[in-house]
Each structure stands twice: as structure tokens, then as C-alpha cells.
Image (cartoon, grey):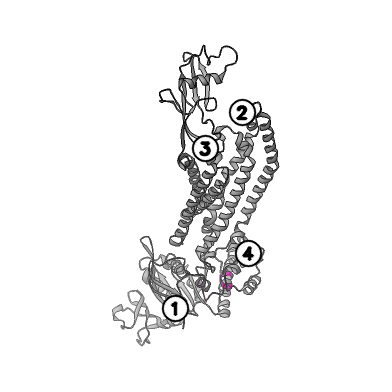
Amino acid sequence: MIWLTWRQFRGSAVMMAAVLVVLTVVLALTGPDLASRYAAGIAGCTPDDTCDQFFDGFFDEYELLFVAVSFVVLALPALVGFFWGAPLITRELEAGTHLLVWNQSITRGRWLAVKLGLVGLVAMAAACVCGLVVTWWSDPLDKSAVPELALMAPLVFGARGIAPMGYAAFAFVLGVTVGILVRRTLPAMALTLAAFAAIQIAMPLLVRPHLMPPVSATFEVSRVNGMGPHIKERGGGSVYISMRPAVPGHLGAWVLSSDLLDPSGRTIAGMGEEAPIPVSATSGPCAPAGGPPNLDACWLEINRLGYRQQATYQPLERFWPFQWIETGIYALLTLGLTWFSFWWLRRRLS
Amino acid sequence: MNTALQAQGLGRRYGKRWALREFTIDIPAGHVVGLVGPNGAGKTTLLKLASGQLEPTAGGITVLGGRPGDTPAQLARVGFVAQDTPVYASLSVADHLRLGARLNPRWDAAMARDRIARLGLDPAQRAGRLSGGQRAQLALTLGLAKRPELLILDEPVASLDPLARREFLQGLMEATVEHQFSVVLSSHLVSDLERVCDFLIVLVDSRVQVAGEVDKLLATHHRLTGPRRDPDRLPADQHVVAARHTDRQSTYVIRTDAPIHDPAWTVTQLTLEDLVLAYMDKRTAGNRRAAVEVQR
């Protein structure tokens, strides 16, 4: 049965292997250079504290490649479910060949087990290799990325580490299960893609923020977590600031909420919303007059008035625990669907 | 003598519709069993129950003394060639033989190779490019080389032209003579079965109409033609299968174990086709669809 499964599957497997080899070679050739440029850049910027500028420039330069590579890792599980999972059984049902193979001296359970096992393991291995190679390659970029594309950010998180392996296993078995239920290849493929996309969107929105209780804390405002201050002429010349999805001292944290509190502790603005601050825009530390504005002094003044950032976040240290937990969740879902497909095969499909 | 297939009150329901019901039979091993009936009569359902692809809704069935399709050992003893003889389009003929060799403990590689060579099939050819007849032969080869004790074929010749039909059935017969196994094959055409079967089951509307050895069936069924007479005036041991009357004449198809002495009757032998048609007619009086199909 292993021979037959491999014989049917080898074309797709070879194609996947070719894609992975090309990806790995390209990343292996460019990776060391990327790392050494990052190291040199850090060594150069640390003494004069200009690393923010270095990060911006460095990341901008590679942003397109960074996004493309991350997209490959995100798309791979979906493609596995679409091209490997959904047609695995439906193609046999449509051609009637399940009747041929079910009447060799092999039980249907074993037939499904070998098919699921072999193709599923190849899918997991491919996603695992792809995920880890990209994680290694993009390490310097992940360290210099803007908060929206940091390692813990929803889209990037799913394209790093071992989570893609869990996604691939799940997408594959999802495709098989949908195929067993729908029995026709094209509808099964479409449904698989839709269902998988929905789950991949729901996961970071609804589940991942609560994998561990998020940290809740109050921080002084500064240019690390604040935007501005800038002066709106039309608003009577008031000084406005807003809160960014970042917290001081926890670089790369996944910020779930970042509110601005006024001196009485009331929330006056959510993440990204601007709020006026009652400081003078014509004199004092926040006035632009008199040479280049001294922003740090203005932030100090705003802090002195009692404005604070109230943030909830998942720190970067939780990256690997989250990866394991999420992979575990997908592994459980995969096992559940596997059990269901065996049950359905025995009960209903004939 | 061993039994090939035994069923007690066997039934299978799809939703509210019974595809097969109250099917009770005991077929000894060593027969070539023809299962005949119009489309939708339940033939495929019965064969799928026998090969273990379906679970019965009611009653029980044993094949070669075992539960159908439950274990690899039972699967090894029963061969099944499905309707339309499916094969893997992308695999070559040689791949199919390898598939058979890998999945069947009793695989007869020499026989499979010989058969493919005798049929003139190119082992390197993809099965998707074979003609319907060649594909059916390939599927039959897989079924035969498995060396089953019972080979089940579901409408194996339905899509073949007359020549391919004859070659297919001939190949099947040669193999049964050589390797001594039982066969159950279904068809909606009696003429296909006439040549090869020595046991017949007529299935109409999900029920068995008649079943038995062909010789015995032919010996106990007669056509009586004579002056018009009502059926209740026939002797008690003559069971009417079909009756047709004109103003002055009656034609009966009857089943009886006793000889017919009444000089008023002209007694004629039935062919197998007549016999099957008589049973189908009986069942579908007022609805000629099934009969038309058989005569086609």
C-alpha cells in the first residue's frame, strides 16, 4: 500500500521538493550575507545610538523579499490542503478506483491510514523545513522590523518556527475530511480553502491572544510608544499625541491594546487615536519655535503632567511557548479530523 | 459441499427505499452464478454486500463461510471487479500488476504476466489509454491473479462491444476451468449469461423472483399452449409464472416437478431468456419497462 500511495503521490512530492530546494538554496546563499550586514550595522550604530535609523533602512531594503518569503510559508499549508488533501480521496471516488483498491487484500482502514500517514508526513516535513529555513534566514530582519511586522505580529508569527508544520498537517486532513464528505474534487478544494482561510483568520483574532494571559501594565509615554507630539493649527493650536502598538522595554512584544490615560486615570484614546494634551504649543518644551523641536523634552513634560500608556501585550519571550501551544492545538484538531474521517469511512462511505 | 454465498433475510435500505430485501439463498461453491435483473433491481447492492463494501440493514450474509470484507484474509479470498471496471488512469499496465502483487498475499504473478501478454497489452502503456475492452481485461486480470475462491463481477461487459464481450467472457470461463473458483456475475442481459452460467438468480424490484441451477430451472419450467383455460383449473403442482390469453387460446409458463400429461397442451421447452423474461413479466405486469430493457 505504501508503494501504491507513493506511486500516486510521487509527482506532487517531487514538485514540492524542487520548490523547497530552490527556496532553501536562495535563502542559504543570501542568509549569511544578510546576517553579517546586520551585525556590522549593529556594531556601527550602537555607539552613537542611531540603531533606529539603521533598522529602518535595513528593513526597507529587504522588505519585499521579507514579505514574499513569509507569504510562501503562509501559503504552503493552504496549498497542501488544496492540492493534496481535498483530491486525495475524491479523485478515487470520482474515478471509481476506490472499488479497485478496496477489493485487494487490504482493509479500507489500512488504505486510509497509509494514504493519510505518508502524504501527511511529507506535507508536515515540507512545511517544517520551509518554516525553519525562513525563520533562520529572516532572523536579522525580524529583529529590525517595524512593530506591525515583528515576530509576534499575527501574520509573521504564522510564517515562522514550527507552527507552519501544524498548519500543514491540519490543512491536509481538513482537505481529506471535506473530500470524504463532499465526494467531489472541485467543491472539496474550494471548501477546504475557504474553511482553512477562515480558521487561519480566526486563530490570531480570537484564540492566540489568550493562549497565555496577556501582560497588563502602565508605562510612561515616550517616543518609543507614542506618536507625535504634533500641533494641529485648526484645533486651536493644541498638542496632539497618539499611542503606538509598542511598549517600552519589551521590544518586539505583540501589543493587543495601547490606550492613553489622562492624569486622572481615564482612558482618553485607544491605539492609534489622537488626543489633545493641555500643554502650550507656543512656549515651553513642546513649542516648535526656537530651533529643532526637542521631542524628548516634550515627552518628559507630558509625563510630568501624568499621562500614561495603559497596554496589554504578549512579550516576545513567549514566541516559542506560543509556537508550541499553537502547533499543539492544530495537532489536536488534526487528530480529531483524522478520527472523524476513519469513522465516516467505516460508517458512511461505500 | 462448501457454500460460496449464503444469505438469510438479507436486506439493505438507502434512506426509505429498500434496494434489496428478504434475500435468502444458499449457493454451493463451484458454480458460475448469473445475477440478472433490470437496472435498479438491486444487483449492485447485493454484490457490494457480498464483497463487504456495504453493511446489511437487515439479515445476514456469509461469503465462503466468513463475514464479507471484514479482514485482509477474507478480502484475499474474494475478488471483485466493479461496474465499469475502474483502473488507475495514470498508472501503467505493469504498475497495476505490481499493485496487485503488493496488495495480495496469494498473487499469481506468472499468470498475470501471461494473461497480459496473451491479450497483447503493452505493459508500459498507461491504463487511461486502454480501450474499454482492454481496460475490462486488465481489471479481470487483477481479479483473477489475486487467485480468489470467489470472483464477483458487477456488470463487467455492460460497456463492451459484442466482440470484446465474447472475449471477456471466454477469458473468464477459461480461468474458471483452469483454477476452479466460484463466480458471481451480474448483467441486465440474459444473453450474456446464457453462455457462461450454470446457476441463475433473477432479481426484480429488489426481490428474488427465482434462483437455482440452470439445468434444473430449464427442466422444471415449461410453456403450455392450448385452448383457453383459467389458471385455477390447472393442477395444483403447476405454478403459474406467466399467463397470456387470447379469445380462444391460453399460453402459460409454469413451474412443476411433475411430468405434464394433459393432451390438450402443446408443451414447449423454454430457453433461459424466455424463462427470465417470464419472471420479469410477472413482476412488472402493467409496467413493461424492465422487459423491454432485457429484450434490447
Q: Are marks 1 and 4 on the same chain?
A: yes
Q: Which residue is mark 3?
A: A315
Name the amino acid type tagged 2. Asp
Quick check: A337 above or below B220?
above
In the rendered image, which residue does mark 4 sit on?
B95
- Where residue B79 appears, x then y in whole percent? 52, 71
Give me the C-alpha separation between circle 4 and circle 2: 62 Å
Q: As shown in the figure, which amino acid type bears the numbered disc 3?
A: Pro
Stretch of the chain drawn in magenta: B142-151
Horizontal side, residue B258 vs residue A251: left or right: left
Q: Determine which residue is flagged by label 1.
A: B27
Chain ID for label 1?
Answer: B
**Where on the picture, by quarter, is residue A42?**
top right
In percent of the image, x 54 and y 55: which residue is there?
A88
Query: Front-most of B246 and A33?
Result: A33
Q: Secondary structure at mark 2?
A: helix
Mark 2, residues whose alpha carbon is within 10 Å: few (<14), some, or many (≥20)?
Answer: few
The amino acid sitting under disc 1 is: Ile
